[in-house]
């Protein structure tokens, strides 16, 4: 806790110094936007130094040796730990909390929308709540799976002891709390009402809370980029002997594809909001109403934000494929085609951005090409589905919570994908764009595709991470509850959108009351399901029955070491000698530990495999 | 080897028929007040029918997974058949999905695009200016109005749209057309109303701002009244002399 307190103190001191300096140099008040920007930059440096940057980096700059947290027990979660497992849990807990806060905002909106007219929040506040909900949830979807499980699981799956750059990894995580703090403090400066998309020129002329939004985006972008470089380098350079590309587990492949994408495009969102910030504080006019170009903003924004939807969903593909193979006990169907498709999606996703701009007034000749490339993405996405369906085909399906939620995912993401075609088609998108049809569509893809996978991943790897089993009955009831009420919430909204209800409105014509009431009631029941989820996790983490290394009898490396894994993951070097998915092949082995002695032997998984190899 | 494909195919066909029948029974769209609306609705309906077999395939495999392929018996149950891939299946899948993608690009993709955005001719031009939080209409003779938009039936009207502050979007749900209003750049949309009527007959006969523009965005709407051409000319002239 000492470091966390120091981080807050140095953060506040930094803020004061930044604001003070600005006022001393140029005059003005403490809430002037320039002062807030400079204050934020100093605060961020104070925070990072305070949490442990001073010891982990600063000491090196003055010729002393580096120190990082060596705490054990619960304390390490509040410190600058460089252990990828600790960082994974830090991401997981932080982002699940953000998911709950964003969920509360969603509940407030649904209550407001239960009937037409202005109820519990006025129209402008509604816009601010939509914007807050949107950006918090986007952050969860972008970093949830890759931050928590990318960090925790990928190094173990490839047989490494840690990430390639452990200190950068820690910095990457500790950049996240300032994002949440800046966003949640923004109401002090009037909050931001331009949506998570922050289209200019509204975002150039609205209240000062927008500045904190901008700073949060830049900070979050740095975190994504650092995380991306780290995973790319780790997967390329730190694989165990024998871990060839053809033997790489699919979740690792998906994490790698995601990281390539995040590394390549994240800076564009940051660039867009930095230009907005300059328009606001430095007198530039990139997007000023009279002289700037609103279309330019949209192009830069979507150049990041379309790929971002794949940053959200590719790790989801990885999780679901991993779960389906494990619980179907069959090799991953068409593994090579699936891997190729992941990267085809990465490539195509950076050249489709303007499908969000079919009604923006951009040049007419652009519509055709962007429609073609967008439809082309449905081909590799279809191959991912083929991989899932082919693996299920005649499998020996064992319905545990992860698979139950994976089934919910499959149903939802199919709807999300199909409705995407309606939006990729210029003729239909002209009507549907910016309506509730779009709202329903992107909830089916983001919640259905990314958040469902995140939740499935939580259940799948829970026994590995905690060493205890969650409650199966509560887990699968939650899975069904979540899926049913998610669908009941969003299905009626497709209808509302097609029939004339636009989005980002706190009030609507009476004609849409029926659909909205239905959605609101369903949403509240959906929200309540999270009590069961969180309750199950907390209870089971403390009192659940202990499990061995491999409760699912899965094959990737993380299941061959004890649960929870020891500090350096492997007590002896694993050697990979076969595919991780050779289910049903007699005598097949993914990896073994050539110099493990009896004492190191963790239990069923690896021992069994060793015997097979030695026999 | 169990012949799973028989029940799966039966389920697939059954679901497809069910979805197609349900799609045909249900009224999906609000009333079409303009020629363009019919084009959009037709495209939507076509996509809905194309979606039926795709959704059904996934649902069929999911259903049979639960009914036919479920096992119990804990972590150490037997493995499935070690099928790694199947060239014929993968190739067929690729060909079918590519063909579908190409088909939707052509129809309704390019066909719809041509019909909606293709023909730049018009009988009248009406100017619309978006501002926080209202629309201002300027008719061909220079008359302006802030309370309603009156248009002639059976005439193709070009809307020239501009904003004086932030982004707005000109959306008429009854016509299924939409185009953003940008500061400093004029954008255009075309619509041919086919029936006389008013906002009181159908809420979708309104211009609704569809781009978040600030506090008053939700209520930035303007009623539309479609009248006969003669009536419209009279109305516009009266408006010019009054104003
Ligand atoms: C309990 C479930 C949820 C409900 C009931 C819900 C409801 C809503 C509502 C009513 C809106 C406003 C729509 C509009 O007017 O444009 C909205 C917007 C949005 N939601 Fe959700 N939501 C939920 C969960 C999520 C999750 C988990 C995510 C992502 C991970 C998400 C992402 C978004 C985004 C990106 C927006 C757009 C915000 C904007 O327009 O700037 N939502 N949601
Ligand atoms: Cu996109
Ligand atoms: Cu608006």
Image (cartoon, coloured by chain):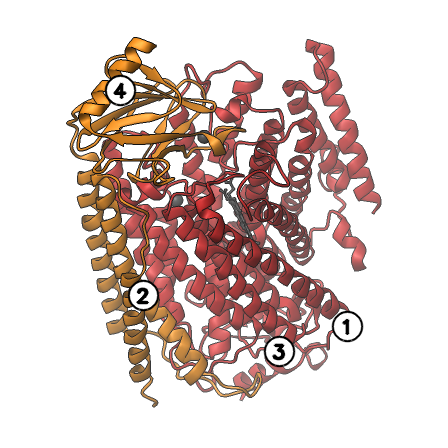
Chain colours: A red, B orange
Distance of mark 4 from mark 3, alpha carbons? 78 Å
Q: Is residue A537 left or right of residue A359?
A: right
The residue pinned by badge 2 equals B22
Distance of mark 4 from mark 2, alpha carbons? 45 Å
Q: Is residue A107 above or below residue A202?
A: below
User: Given this view, does label 3 or label 2 mark the residue nearer the observer?
Assistant: 2
Proximity of marks 4 and 3: CB atoms separated by less than 8 Å: no
Decide if residue A239 is in sight here: no
- Residue B103 lies, in percent from the top left, at 19, 54
The residue sitting at 71% across, 65% down in the picture is A535
- Residue B138 lies, in percent from the top left, at 31, 17
Mark 2: few/some/many CA within 10 Å (<14, 14-19, 20+)? few
Numbered tag placed on residue A551 in the rendering: 3
User: Given this view, does label 3 or label 1 mark the residue nearer the observer?
Assistant: 1
The residue pinned by badge 1 equals A543
Q: Is mark 2 within 8 Å of ligand 1?
A: no
The residue sitting at 26% across, 35% down in the picture is A366
- Residue A469 lies, in percent from the top left, at 68, 74
Decide if residue A504 is in sight here: yes
Mark 1: few/some/many CA within 10 Å (<14, 14-19, 20+)? few
Q: Is residue A485 above or below residue A422?
A: below
Q: Are marks 4 and 1 on the same chain?
A: no
Distance of mark 2 from mark 1, alpha carbons? 49 Å
The residue pinned by badge 4 equals B235
The residue sitting at 46% across, 74% down in the picture is A581
Label 3: which secondary element = loop
């Amino acid at each position: 806790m000492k470091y966390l307190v120091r981080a807050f103190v140095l953060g506040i001191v930094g803020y004061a110094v930044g604001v003070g300096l600005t006022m001393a140099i140029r005059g003005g008040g403490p809430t002037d936007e320039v002062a807030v920007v400079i204050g934020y930059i100093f605060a961020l440096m104070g925070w990072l130094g305070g949490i442990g940057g001073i010891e982990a980096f600063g000491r090196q700059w003055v010729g002393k040796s580096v120190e990082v947290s060596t705490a054990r027990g619960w304390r390490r979660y509040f410190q600058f730990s460089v252990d990828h497992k600790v960082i994974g849990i830090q991401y997981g807990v932080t982002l699940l909390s953000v998911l709950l806060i964003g969920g509360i905002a969603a509940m407030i909106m649904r209550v407001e929308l239960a009937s037409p007219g202005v109820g519990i929040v006025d129209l402008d506040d509604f816009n601010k709540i939509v914007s807050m909900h949107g950006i918090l949830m986007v952050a969860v979807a972008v970093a949830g799976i890759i931050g928590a499980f990318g960090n925790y699981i990928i190094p173990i799956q490839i047989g490494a002891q840690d990430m390639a750059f452990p200190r950068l990894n820690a910095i990457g995580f500790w950049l996240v709390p300032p994002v949440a703090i800046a966003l949640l403090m923004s109401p002090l400066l009037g909050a931001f009402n331009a949506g998570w998309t922050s289209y200019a020129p509204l975002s150039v002329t609205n209240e000062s809370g927008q500045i904190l939004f901008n700073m949060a985006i830049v900070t979050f972008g740095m975190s994504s980029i650092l995380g991306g470089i780290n995973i790319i380098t780790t997967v390329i350079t730190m694989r165990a002997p024998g871990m060839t590309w053809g033997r790489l587990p699919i979740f690792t492949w998906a994490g790698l594809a995601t990281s390539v994408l995040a590394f390549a495009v994240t800076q564009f969102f940051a660039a867009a909001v930095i230009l907005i910030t300059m328009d606001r504080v430095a007198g530039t006019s990139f997007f000023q109403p009279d002289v700037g170009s609103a279309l330019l903003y949209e192009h830069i924004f979507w150049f990041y934000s379309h790929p971002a939807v794949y940053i959200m969903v590719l790790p989801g593909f990885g999780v679901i494929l991993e779960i389906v193979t494990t619980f179907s006990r069959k090799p991953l169907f068409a593994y090579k085609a699936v891997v190729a498709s992941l990267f085809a999606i990465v490539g195509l996703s950076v050249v489709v951005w303007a499908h969000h701009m079919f009604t923006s007034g951009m040049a007419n000749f652009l519509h055709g090409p962007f429609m073609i490339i967008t439809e082309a993405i449905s081909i590799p996405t279809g191959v991912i589905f083929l991989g899932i369906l082919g693996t299920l085909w005649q499998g020996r399906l064992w319905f545990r919570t992860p698979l139950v939620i994976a089934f919910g995912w499959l149903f939802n993401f199919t709807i999300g994908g199909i409705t995407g075609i309606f939006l990729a088609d210029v003729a239909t998108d002209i009507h549907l764009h910016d309506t509730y049809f779009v709202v329903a569509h992107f909830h089916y893809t983001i919640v259905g595709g990314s958040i469902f996978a995140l939740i499935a991943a939580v259940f799948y790897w829970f026994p590995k991470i905690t060493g205890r089993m969650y409650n199966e009955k509560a887990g699968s009831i939650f899975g069904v509850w979540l899926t049913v009420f998610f669908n009941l919430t969003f299905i009626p909204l497709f209808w509302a959108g097609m029939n004339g209800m636009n989005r980002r409105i706190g009030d609507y014509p009476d004609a849409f009351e029926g659909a909205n009431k239905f959605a609101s009631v369903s949403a509240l029941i959906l929200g309540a399901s999270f009590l069961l989820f969180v309750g199950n996790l907390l209870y089971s983490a403390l009192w659940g029955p202990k499990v061995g290394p491999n409760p699912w009898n899965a094959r990737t490396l993380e299941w061959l070491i004890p649960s929870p894994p020891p500090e350096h993951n492997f007590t002896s070097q694993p050697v990979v000698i076969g595919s991780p998915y050779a289910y049903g092949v007699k005598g097949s082995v993914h990896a073994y530990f050539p110099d493990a002695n009896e004492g190191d032997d963790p239990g069923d998984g690896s021992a069994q495999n060793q015997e097979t190899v030695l026999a | 080897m169990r012949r799973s494909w028989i029940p799966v195919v039966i389920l697939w066909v059954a679901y497809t028929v069910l979805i197609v029948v349900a799609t045909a029974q249900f009224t999906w769209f609000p009333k079409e007040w303009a020629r363009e609306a019919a084009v959009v609705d037709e495209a939507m309906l076509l996509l809905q029918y194309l979606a039926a077999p795709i959704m059904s395939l996934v649902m069929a495999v999911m259903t049979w997974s639960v009914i036919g392929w479920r096992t119990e018996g804990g972590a150490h149950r037997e493995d499935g058949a070690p099928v790694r891939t199947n060239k014929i299946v993968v190739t067929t899948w690729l060909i079918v999905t590519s063909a579908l993608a190409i088909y939707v690009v052509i129809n309704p993709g390019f066909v719809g695009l041509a019909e909606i955005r293709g023909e730049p001719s018009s009988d009248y031009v009406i100017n619309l200016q978006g501002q926080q939080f209202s629309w201002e209409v300027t008719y061909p003779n220079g008359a302006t109005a802030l309370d309603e938009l009156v248009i002639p039936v059976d005439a193709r009207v070009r809307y020239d749209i501009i904003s004086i502050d932030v982004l707005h979007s000109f959306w008429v749900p009854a016509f299924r057309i939409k185009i953003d209003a940008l500061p400093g750049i004029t954008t255009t949309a075309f619509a041919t109303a086919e029936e006389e009527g008013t906002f009181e007959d159908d809420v979708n006969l309104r211009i609704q701002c569809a781009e978040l523009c600030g506090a008053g965005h939700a209520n930035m709407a303007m009623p539309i009244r479609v009248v006969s051409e003669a009536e419209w000319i009279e109305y516009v002239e009266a408006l010019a002399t009054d104003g």
